[in-house]
Image: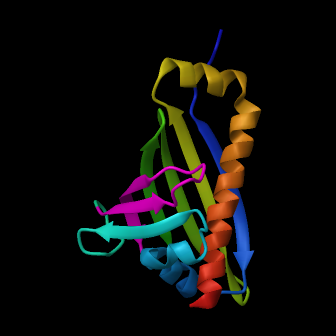
């Protein structure tokens, strides 16, 4: 019998940048394209701030194997935690960023909980679970490292 459970994937990265600098990188969404090469533009509405209910829209560069994405901010605890909800291509994800001090720098733990919205996606996630987990982990590392790179630049 197939078990249709969400995938939960987590990765932790460290940086010499302070936790405040990492949070600043997260909340400075219009600068994300500087470190996310497939993204051309990022906006946060309605007020440009990371707060519950805000929507982050990231527009992908044309001709890339990346799609436009929107994220709803579910929780924003400055300097500590950010939770985003997204949906694309039949999958829904809740991604949590947890920031902690780590000696002279910081540690960021990204955890994604991914659920398929359609039956075919549920079957795919069950049969090829390891491959899906690998793709999700790579995406988390890429996004997390991009935010740490931006934090070091700010």
Residue 79 is at least partly visible in this image: no
At 42% from the left edge and 68% from the top edge, which residue is drawn? 42
Above or below 81: residue 63: above
Residue 38 image-quadrant placement: bottom right
Q: Residue at x 72, y 68 (%)?
A: 13
Residue at 64%, 57% (x, y): give it: 140
Is residue 60 magenta-colored? Answer: yes
Give the colour scheme shown.
rainbow
Looking at the rendered structure, the number of numbered marks drawn on it comes to: 0
Q: Which residues are magenta?
A: 54-78
Tell me if 10 is positioned left or right of 95 in this view.
right
Which quadrant does the N terminus fall into? top right
Whether 152 is among the magenta residues is no
Relative to 140, does residue 87 appear above or below in the rendering?
above
Question: Can residue 64 be spotted in the picture?
Answer: yes
Q: Along the line of sight, which residue is nearer the eye, 94 or 38?
A: 38
Q: 11 or 139, which lies in front?
A: 139
Q: Position of residue 101 (x, y in %)?
A: 64, 81
Could you say where residue 44 lies in the image, as x and y percent from the top left? 34, 69
Magenta stretch prevailing secondary structure: strand
* Residue 49 spot, x, y in % from top left: 32, 75
Going by the image, does 47 lie left or right of 70? Answer: left
Identify the residue at image location x=52%, y=34%: 115
Q: Quadrant of residue 149 in the image?
A: bottom right
């Amino acid at each position: 019998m197939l078990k249709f459970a969400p995938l939960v994937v987590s990765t932790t990265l460290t940086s010499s940048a302070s936790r405040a600098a990492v949070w600043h990188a997260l909340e400075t969404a219009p600068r994300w394209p500087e470190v996310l090469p497939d993204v051309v533009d990022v906006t946060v509405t309605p007020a440009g701030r990371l707060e519950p209910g805000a929507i982050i829209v990231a527009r992908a560069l044309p001709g890339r194997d990346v799609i436009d994405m929107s994220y709803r901010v579910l929780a924003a605890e400055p300097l500590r935690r950010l939770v985003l909800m997204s949906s694309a291509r039949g999958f829904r994800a809740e991604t949590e960023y947890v920031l902690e001090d780590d000696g002279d720098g910081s540690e960021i733990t990204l955890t994604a909980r991914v659920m398929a919205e359609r039956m075919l996606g549920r079957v795919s996630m069950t049969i090829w679970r390891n491959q899906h987990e690998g793709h999700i982990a790579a995406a988390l590392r890429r996004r997390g490292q991009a935010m740490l790179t931006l934090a070091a630049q700010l």
